[in-house]
Amino acid sequence: METTDPLFAGRALGLVKVAEADFAETATRLDADAERCRPGAESFVNPAKSLALGLAGSIPVIWGSSPLATVAARRFADTLAANARYPAMAGALGEAGRGRVGLLDGVFGGLAESSRDIFADEEDDGPTRLRLVVMRDGGLNPEDEADEPVAVEERRAEAVQTLADRRGVRCDVLVAEGGSSLERLASLVAVPDFASLYLALAHGLDPMAVPAISEMKELSNPLPEAIQ
């Protein structure tokens, strides 16, 4: 089943409003992102490989600046877990500002930076650090569709980037592009999807083979009475 099939069905049932042009523009964007993220492209021109290299060996914290961006952030955390076996925290930047932003001051954030040997080789493996990924909606949502004013979302995103920089926590920023919600969501999903696969491959993992899942099924399913 194509990923757009549920959207077509939802539109037919009147559950979602998606214009025909939105599908076409989103498909074009996904094709362009697939070309940019193709395996043969070097990391300096491949945004997915670059993102994967930045996340390698870190604890990813992914925050979305808007409801749409938060959906993409949570999906990225799920794909990192499923494909690369990486633990990741994801959520809305508005919620993070009420507590979780304190992670930047913790043992994997600012404290790790303060204890770093300033004379150490940058290439040497240091302590595990947070890697912040901020997904921004780009201020394209109409005000009447947003939970809060776009200006507030943008200021909050700028603030958390500044906080991360002050604490030496590296930050990747992905900004949504496109004229419709569907296309903007796709623009925040495509590159991270590829990044999760490249991160898995960098660690020698097969994204499609997860022994723990098979073992979990075996251990949790009761044996038939005939062979007990």
Image: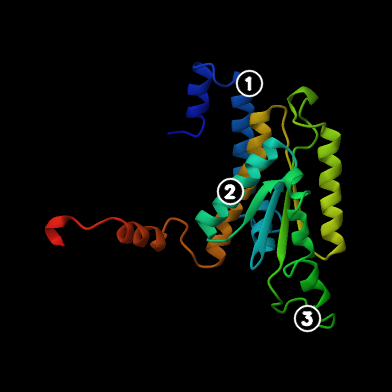
Q: Position of residue 203 (x, y in %)?
A: 54, 67
Where does label 1 land, which residue? 21
Q: Position of residue 115 (x, y in %)?
A: 80, 78
Rendered view: 156 above or below 133: above
Task: Choose mark 1 or mark 2, whichever is in front.
Answer: 2
Quarter of image, res 106: bottom right
Q: Position of residue 209 (x, y in %)?
A: 41, 59
Where does label 2 land, which residue? 193
By what rule are the colours in the image chosen? rainbow
Q: Nearer the viewer, residue 57 or 53?
A: 57
Say which element carries label 3.
loop
Q: Nearer the viewer, residue 32 or 228?
A: 228
Asked whether the residues under the numbered discs 2 and 3 touch, taking CB atoms below 8 Å apart as contact, a structural biologist would say no
Q: Which of the marked residues, 3 or 1, is nearer the chain's N terminus?
A: 1
Which residue sits at x=77%, y=73%?
Answer: 112
Q: Which mark is residue 121?
A: 3
* Measured Cα–Cα span from mark 2 to mark 3: 32 Å
Q: Residues within 10 Å of mark 2 (few under 14, many from 20)?
A: many
Q: Residues within 10 Å of mark 3 (few under 14, many from 20)?
A: few
Q: Which of the marked residues, 1 or 2, is nearer the chain's N terminus?
A: 1
Q: Amino acid at mark 3?
A: Asp
Q: How many marks?
A: 3
Say which element carries label 1.
helix
Q: Can residue 200 be seen from the camera position used here?
A: yes
Which residue sits at x=52%, y=61%?
Answer: 85
Q: Amino acid at mark 1?
A: Ala
Say which element carries label 2.
helix
Question: Where does the C terminus fall, quadrant-wise?
Answer: bottom left
Q: Residues within 10 Å of mark 1 (few under 14, many from 20)?
A: few
Q: Position of residue 188 (x, y in %)?
A: 67, 42
Which residue sits at x=78%, y=31%?
Answer: 140
Asked whether the residues under the numbered discs 1 and 2 touch, taking CB atoms below 8 Å apart as contact, a structural biologist would say no
